[in-house]
Image (cartoon, helix red, strand yellow):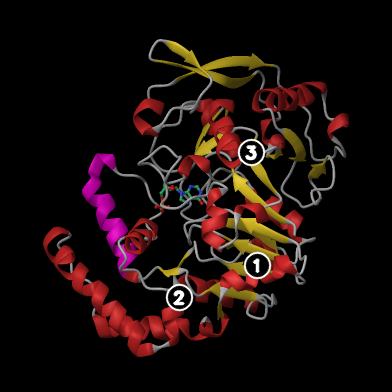
Amino acid sequence: MPLIGVVGCQWGDEGKGKIIDVLANDMDLVARYQGGHNAGHTVVVKGEQSILHLIPSGILHENCRCLIGNGVVVSPAALREEIQFFEARGIKVRERLAISENAHLLLPYHAMLDQAQERLRGAGKIGTTGRGIGAAYGDKVMRQGIHVGDLRVKDLFAAKVRNALAYYKPIFAQILDTAPPDEDDLIEEVWREADILRPLITDGVALINDALDRNERVLAEGAQGLHLDIDFGTYPYVTSSNPSAGGICTGLGVGPTRITKIIGVVKAYSTRVGEGPFPTELIGTTGERLREAGNEYGATTGRPRRCGWFDAVAVRRAIQVSAIKEIVITKLDVLTGFDPLFYCDRYRLNGETTETFSFGADLVSRAKPQLEELPGWAEPLAEFKSRGELPANTRAYLDRIEKSLKASIIGVSTGAGREHMLLARPVLP
Ligand code: IMP
């Protein structure tokens, strides 16, 4: 012990990567529990900006080991590329990275399916990253997925690919009007891509539980956020895994009593990328100003993110689902110069006022945010050294968040750098 989970409380892109990067300094192991290379954590390595998609953020701290857990879907090509990218910049990746043998593979036909499905959905498209995430998790749930561990024995791996393609061939031909990849070419290509991954394949369940038994400090790294959760998000405009805290248990093979605490990461305003309801969305110049001020463009696809005011109703649902008592507020500095600010603590829905987030996309898209006006501030925040020294209106904004979420703010991020983090108290128990 301890095992600390870091989860997103909005629609992803809350800035979890930075928080994990700050915490990883004190961690022995960082384990990613869900998602795939749809996620993107922007990091600066030796002055160069680069993006981690699959490798846990702990890899930037040389004393920290990393695990890609069974709940992740792994593209061998994407992971190989990422390992080589960071190793070329002097980061020792393979010495410190392990991949759970029962993580599922995401193969090229999954991306083809994802993109074709989106085309077929027409106006009802989800706005996926096009990486094949839903198709890979779909195969897992339909019991025709292929495990990372299957990459160890070529004839077994080849048989599973042939089996999967036998299912997909008619679908590609008749529904998607395209040819699936050639079986033999695909088997050879993936086998080659997997050469550098093969030695990293391990029993992830034993690795993490043994580390906890040895009293090591372990961080469970989430991707995306609660409202993209397959069970609790604005379905069907969601991803295909569980970013909420429950995903830690199923995505790493640790029991719930192992979890010491969950830290929720909450951006000081709201953003969403892709389709789906977004009650506090700002359409027009204020939204565009927020996008530019916060550089709100997708780390994986470069798509402009939709921006909106802080939505406490949405975040409260995340706090409830993941039993979060402590939160970190990110990108507070971005709100400098927005005066007044608006804050949503309740919705109007079906003629009633509600403080509770509704279920599914249909109802949420009818919710009308009830906005409160709050005074903004003009001061840049990067130089402040503690929450108590912040401008009065900034402190009032944080107090408002704390009161409406009933969770303690343990950290506030006031800029992009590691040093721009005001911590109220040590995060580790
Ligand atoms: P998928 O995960 O590619 O299937 O995409 C499903 C939805 O989740 C889309 O709206 C994506 O834009 C969104 N999404 C997936 N990964 C991320 C992320 O890391 N940050 C923000 N949104 C994401």
Q: CA distance from mark 1 to mark 2?
A: 20 Å
Label 3's element?
Answer: strand
Answer few, some or many: residues within 10 Å of disc 1's Cα (few below 14, many 20 plus, some between 14 and 19).
some
Query: If you read the primary sequence from the N terminus, does the residue marked by circle 3 or circle 1 appear first?
Result: 1
Q: Which residue is mark 2?
A: 148
Q: Nearer the viewer, mark 1 or mark 2?
A: 1
Residue 379 against residue 148 in the figure, above or below: above
Residue 276 lies in quadrant = top left
Answer few, some or many: residues within 10 Å of disc 2's Cα (few below 14, many 20 plus, some between 14 and 19).
many
Q: Give, as a three-letter code, the residue at label 2.
A: Val
Q: Give, as a three-letter code, the residue at label 1.
A: Asn
Expressed as whole percent of the image width and height from the top left, the position of residue 148 reads 45, 75
Q: CA distance from mark 3 to mark 1?
A: 29 Å
Q: Is residue 92 left or right of residue 251?
A: right
**Membership of 352 in magenta stretch:** no
Query: If you read the primary sequence from the N terminus, does the residue marked by circle 3 or circle 2 appear first?
Result: 2
207 or 314, which lies in front? Answer: 207
Label 2's element?
Answer: helix
Res. 377 visible in picture: no
Label 1's element?
Answer: helix
Residue extending furthest left? 174
Expressed as whole percent of the image width and height from the top left, the position of residue 348 reads 46, 15
Number of marks drawn: 3
Q: Which residue is mark 1?
A: 209
227 or 37, which lies in front? Answer: 227
Q: Give, as a three-letter code, the residue at label 3.
A: Val
Q: Which residue is mark 3?
A: 266
Residue extending furthest top? 351
- Residue at left offset 56%, top offset 34%: 270
